[in-house]
Image (tube, helix red, strand yellow):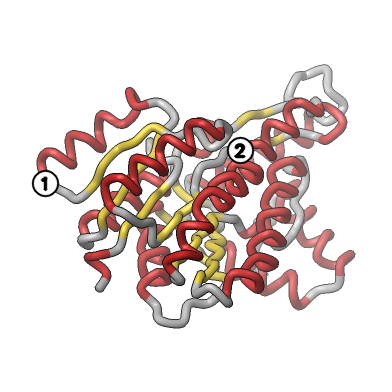
Amino acid sequence: MKDNKTVLVTGCSSGIGYATCLLFARNNFTTYASVRDLSKAKKIQEIINREKLPLKVIRLNVNDNESIKIAIQKIISDSGKIDILINNAGYGMFGPIEEISLEDIKEQFETNFFGIIRLIKAIVPIMRKQRSGTIVNISSMVGRFGVPLNAAYVSSKFALEGLSESISFELEEFGIKVILIEPGVVQTDFLHNLKIKGNDAKSPYYKLMDLRIAFLKATINSNVSSSDQVANTILHAVNSKDPALRYVIGNDATNSIHVRKKLHDREFMKWIREGIFHGKGLTR
């Protein structure tokens, strides 16, 4: 029964995580919404109090092993199990690889990739003993293909795709399912939280960066997916008796992944280049 399931969602202060933790709680899942900074969870707490939801806010920093340990101990102490882990915490970074420091790239991977590994390593033993569980990793359409001036973020999502596909083999024997969520551009605080490198006027990449950010802003202001759409897809996947490995969300993601499969590498790169840098958009 779904109302007996215990769910941990990371990165819930805004965006996809925020929408997902509320949706699961409103569907009677015992839900733990994790945030790095509890002061950013006031809005969630107000909704919990008003709607009397089965939702608790806990502090968890995916880059801190001790923080993860304490959070998981709290959940196990309260609920005795963890049925679903939704790895959502992450952020975007734009900039040419030449001008992004190695430390910046490591920081990107620390949150977007190694943070997920930390959670998986901490929770898989619990799920394995239960002989059941679901791990949902929030990837992106750019986990399936590269785009310019986004290499650090894209490579972190490529890595997540490979990780998810690989562990799905080894965890299946223990009744643990792995699901990848691949949204296109989503109307969230992504742009506000975006880290941008190489957009200084002195940079040789300045003009390209200007076009790249303009394209992103135009895309976000168009008819893109919402956090609620992503959350509903996650709920549908988790409730499925036989979920797919990958769920693509949004017309932009569906179209781009279709084109990627259809075109040869050089043709696809030309399509991306013209769409982003020459104002043609990613349509076909």
Residue 203 horizontal side relative to residue 255, left or right: right
Q: Earlier in the sequence, mark 1 or mark 2?
A: 1
Residue 110 horizontal side relative to residue 25, left or right: right
The residue that disc 1 covers is 52
**Residue 30: image location, x then y, percent:** 26, 55
**Residue 280: image location, x then y, percent:** 69, 56
User: Label 1 is placed on what type of residue?
Assistant: Lys
Q: Secondary structure at mark 2?
A: helix
From this viewpoint, which residue is outermost toward the bottom?
242
Quadrant in which the N terminus is drawn: bottom left
User: Label 2 is placed on what type of residue?
Assistant: Thr
Q: Name the residue located 76 percent from the left edge and 54 percent from the top edge.
A: 146
Task: Tell me if I can see residue 171 in this picture.
Answer: yes
How many marks on residues? 2
Numbered tag placed on residue 111 in the rendering: 2
Q: Could you classify mark 1 by the number of other residues whose Cα lies within 10 Å: few (under 14), some (14-19), or many (20 or more)?
A: few
